[in-house]
Amino acid sequence: MAKRRRKRRRLKRGVYVFLLFFALFVTSCTMLVRRLTYEEPYVPVELTPIERAMHAYNWDYLTTDGNYASYEDESYTSRQGIDVSAHQEEIDWQRVKDAGIEFAIIRTGYRGTESGRCTEDVWFRTNVEGAAAAGIETGVYFFSQAVSEEEAVEEADFVLDQIKGYDVEGPVVFDMEHPEIGTDRILNVSREEKTRIAKAFLSRVQKAGYKAMLYNSTGLFDEFFEMDMLGEFPLWAAEYGSLPHYSYMFEIWQYTNRGRVDGITGNVDMDIQIVSK
């Protein structure tokens, strides 16, 4: 009898030990899953004014040759680029490379002006893979219609998920404009809130290790945003004509939407990036 009782006690202890280790295993797995799936709670951005620098470009050193433009002085040189979306449809990227294009900024997608859904550009993956295969440096942009900081973060995460696995060396760009057609979701969004939205997107991208950049026309930067609150981010400025009149520092100039490049059917936006020597 005594031997049987000892056997039962050992069995009970064994069961207790097993249950203890099983509970610890389940707890560890639960904590790991939570760690892997945990999303940081959203914290509203802080708007801190940063004095904007004026550029030191001397447009006497700007030269043009047909659709192409270049800039060269003692401090700066330039690179020739384009930006594309589904509007260009199929592109022969090797011919584009042979035509002298050094970088391309490719639309990843857009938020619908009526539906409010984030949608991938149908040519994005074909374009980013084709440009990379041809040896063209790629950046990307997203057309935003976010009406809140939370939607801006959603857009940034959408883009970051899209570009996983691709070698995006150029900027990841926030593009907010009034659309030409459809319902304008951002029509009643204040200038301050647009600024917060832009910063939320750009900060998210920057935190992920990419170069975050803000795009707009030179006439709309200050209409849309409190630019002093976005002074930490480089600018891609659109102004069509023989030279830009924007006085503040910008890195990329989109100078026409009617460019022609071998390998692309129809018009394409042309850009130059001005870089320090």
Image (cartoon, rainbow, N blue to C red):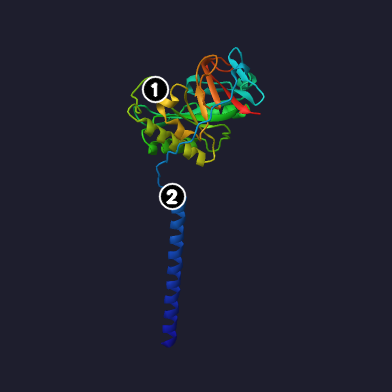
Q: Which residue sits at x=43%, y=35%?
A: 155
Q: Amino acid at mark 1?
A: Pro
Circle 1 crowding by C-alpha within 10 Å: few under 14, some 14–19, many from 20: some
Depth check: give the residue in front, 4 or 19: 19
Residue at 44 percent across and 69 percent down: it is: 20
Residue 51 visible to an observer of this rendering: yes
Quadrant of the snapshot with the N terminus: bottom left
Q: Residues within 10 Å of mark 2 (few under 14, many from 20)?
A: few
As shown in the figure, which amino acid type bears the numbered disc 2?
A: Tyr
Closer to the chain start, of discs 1 and 2, is 2
Tag count: 2
How far across and how far down the image is residue 167, in percent? Answer: 58, 35
102 sits left or right of 17 in the view: right
Q: Looking at this view, is 112 or 240 the one in front? A: 240
- Residue 38: image tag: 2
In this view, the mark in front (1 or 2): 1
Identity of the residue drawn at 64% across and 24% down = 77
Would residue 225 appear left or right of 130 to someone viewing this image? Answer: left
SS of the residue under disc 1 = loop
**Residue 264 figure quarter:** top right
Residue 117 seen by the camera? no
Residue 199 in the image, given as x and y percentages of width and height? 44, 36
What residue occupies the far top of the structure in this picture?
Answer: 66
Q: Position of residue 250 (x, y in %)?
A: 54, 27
Residue 172, position in %: x, y?
51, 33
* Nearer the observer, 57 or 186: 57
Q: Which residue is mark 1?
A: 179
